[in-house]
Amino acid sequence: MIRVEELVKRYRSAKQNAVDGITFDVGAGEFFALLGPNGAGKTTTISILTTTLAPTSGRAFIDGHDIVADASTVRRSVGIIFQKASLDLNLTGEENVRLHAVLYGLYAYAPSYRLMSDAYRRQLQELAALVGLEREIRAPVRTLSGGMRRKLEIVRSLMHRPKVLFLDEPTAGLDPPSRRTLWEHLTTVRREAATTIFLTTHYLEEAEQADRILVIDHGRVVAQGSPASLKADLAREWLVIDADDRAGLRAELAALAIRFSGDGPFQVVAAGAAVHPVLRSIATPLTSVHIHAPSLEDAYLDIVSRTADE
């Protein structure tokens, strides 16, 4: 669904490329996450793929269409939810959606919702129900909460039935319950419409469910793979133990040549089958024992820190 080949973007007077020769692809119906620190090139990449920014060199295709040579077709194939809301606060939710639908040439314009075609009203009602916005869809946008505005943007972005939905920090500024609800609706959208999801986010737990993750830093690809593979390759499990006699436990760990860190609780590098032999070898009475499984955040921080050291 998305193919990117040696994509480069260099801004005028910049000392280095914002996007520096990245190559990747995204399959149809896939949930793909693009991660990286601030200034890594994430928003620039999305801007290029959605045709709002021209690349300096390289090529990219959406559903087989060149983003430069066939930009108008690409725009009809994608939906976008920007980091910052792009709704007209002086209109109702429905009026925002109607304007979008008319600009895309989906329906003939009518000055009121009642005069719009049955097909438009039916589609709007279906999408509003999909994200739980049936009652609020015709309310003034300025009266809606941040979570409701995000839902409205989903409705608007799906009116033209895009094959790819780009989400640039879609939950920025939302409280945790609103973030969870929004993702429940996005999951439903993906399942029912087979929409390809392309996400950038600083909330790494949102990328845990992605099929694949690409990590970029300073405009370059530094890691890619499934969340499970990134965690397995770049972060290890460790054992966390403690004792009332920390000095004795520290001395025993050192005598047993068991690698550890910390002053108590102690972090011991031991994963999987190695955990039980380590625990059996320790004579000091332990007051706490647990295994820390690496999270995507652990893996991400590991990746970024390695990149910074290079």
Image (tube, helix red, strand yellow):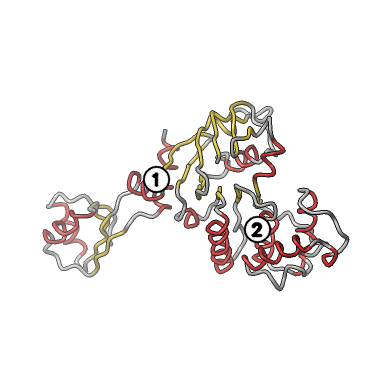
- On screen, residue 174 versus residue 101, left or right, reads left
Asked if labels 2 and 1 touch by Cβ distance under 8 angstroms, the answer is no
Residue 120's mark? none
Please tell me how crowded label 2 is: few (under 14), some (14-19), or many (20+) other residues with Cα within 10 Å. Answer: many
Kind of residue at disc 2: Ile
From the top left corner, tell me how far across and down residue 307 is, in percent: 43, 37
Can residue 199 be seen in this snapshot? no
Q: Which secondary structure, mark 2?
A: helix
- On screen, residue 36 versus residue 252, left or right, reads right
Which residue extends farthest right?
111
- On screen, residue 243 versus residue 78, left or right, reads left
- Tell me what residue is drawn at x 56 percent, y 67 percent: 181
Query: Of circles 1 and 2, which is in front?
Result: 2
Which residue extends farthest bottom?
135
Kind of residue at disc 1: Asp
From the top left corner, tell me how far across and down residue 224 is, in percent: 43, 41
Residue at which label 1 appears: 302
Q: Which secondary structure, mark 1?
A: helix
Please tell me how crowded label 1 is: few (under 14), some (14-19), or many (20+) other residues with Cα within 10 Å. Answer: some
Q: Is residue 226 above or below residue 283?
A: above
Q: Is residue 271 above or below residue 137?
A: above
From the top left corner, tell me how far across and down residue 207 is, in percent: 48, 53
* Quarter containing the N terminus: top right
- Relative to the observer, which residue lies in front, 209 or 287? 209
Q: Quadrant of residue 249?
A: bottom left
N-terminal of the two: label 1 or label 2?
Answer: 2
Residue 154's mark? 2
